[in-house]
Image (cartoon, helix red, strand yellow):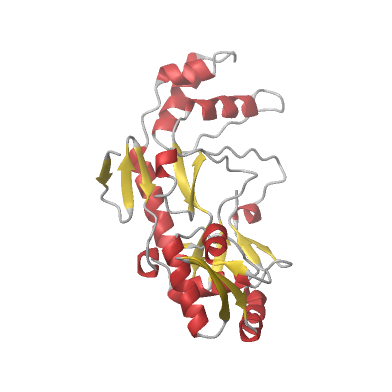
Amino acid sequence: MDSEEAKFPGMVRHADIFFPLAPMSVNEMGVDNDVLLDCVLRLSSTTPQFTTEWVATNAHLTLPVAEELLEQLKNQELVSILGQLSSFNYRYTVTQRGRERASRLFEITGYVGAAPVTLEAYSEMMRLDSFQQNEIRESDIRAACSELALDDNVVDIAGIALNARRSLFLYGPPGNGKTQLARRLHQAVSGDFWIPYCIQINQSIIRIFDPKCHEKREIPAALKNRVDGRWVRIRRPLVCVGGEMTLESLDLIYTSSHRIYEAPP
């Protein structure tokens, strides 16, 4: 593999793709240790028995990180070992003390899943993406819009707006092709990028990845064991909304039944 260290912490380049390198220790995770322990304990409490590999898979951690966190939970008498399956794979169960602790944690947030990244790491990844974006060619825009009857100045303005990474306001009466034009312009914009499954802000977990809005991209097989599983590579999203959208739709969404914050689309 032709890998080159990037100027961004924890990022490595493979061919034309920068990818987040999988942490091999808790210190490399960049997240508060207690937050990670809470995430693993909530996850572990959802099943009677579990293994190190199960935690690594469901929390999107490397095996060494999962093992290190479970060792800490064991030392706090929150989980106990039932047996050893292989060199780095043990069978565990949550103790009564651990279940009481998990119950209190679920009163704060019901989130169970991939371990979070920090807001700072998310912001840094977005900055990296902005540096990597390629110029959108006029020929790509014209090809994407070839089946639409458009004036040349519309294509020119769209190209300027897309390359400037600025907003483009499409307006007009119903049925004049606004949505079709937006979809075609989206086709002309190439480039995938990374987003986290969730981020941590203070003691809150905010879910970022939304399978209804984000289309996962396959990553090269050679990278799968090296990529930080807390990140998912997606196609640049397109979200279409109607008149029902309000300013409140752009705020954080709190689901009281699950006690989870979700980022707006």
Which residue occupies 47% across, 30% down?
189
> As displayed, is residue 121 above or below residue 141?
below
Frontmost residue, 244 versus 256? 256
Which residue occupies 68% across, 72% down?
48
**Horizontal relation, residue 81 to residue 25: left or right:** right
**Horizontal relation, residue 151 to residue 256: left or right:** left
- Percent of width and height locating residue 236: 50, 38
Which residue occupies 61% across, 49% down?
210
Does the image show residue 92? yes
Does the image show residue 202? no
- Percent of width and height locating residue 257: 74, 67
> As displayed, is residue 59 above or below residue 164?
below
Which residue occupies 37% across, 42% down?
130
> As displayed, is residue 160 above or below residue 63?
above
**Horizontal relation, residue 184 to residue 256: left or right:** left
- Percent of width and height locating residue 44: 61, 70
- Percent of width and height locating residue 253: 64, 60
Q: Quadrant of residue 215?
A: top right
Total number of numbered discs in the rendering: 0
**Horizontal relation, residue 10 to residue 181: left or right:** left
Frontmost residue, 174 versus 9? 9
State the quadrant of the N terminus.
top left
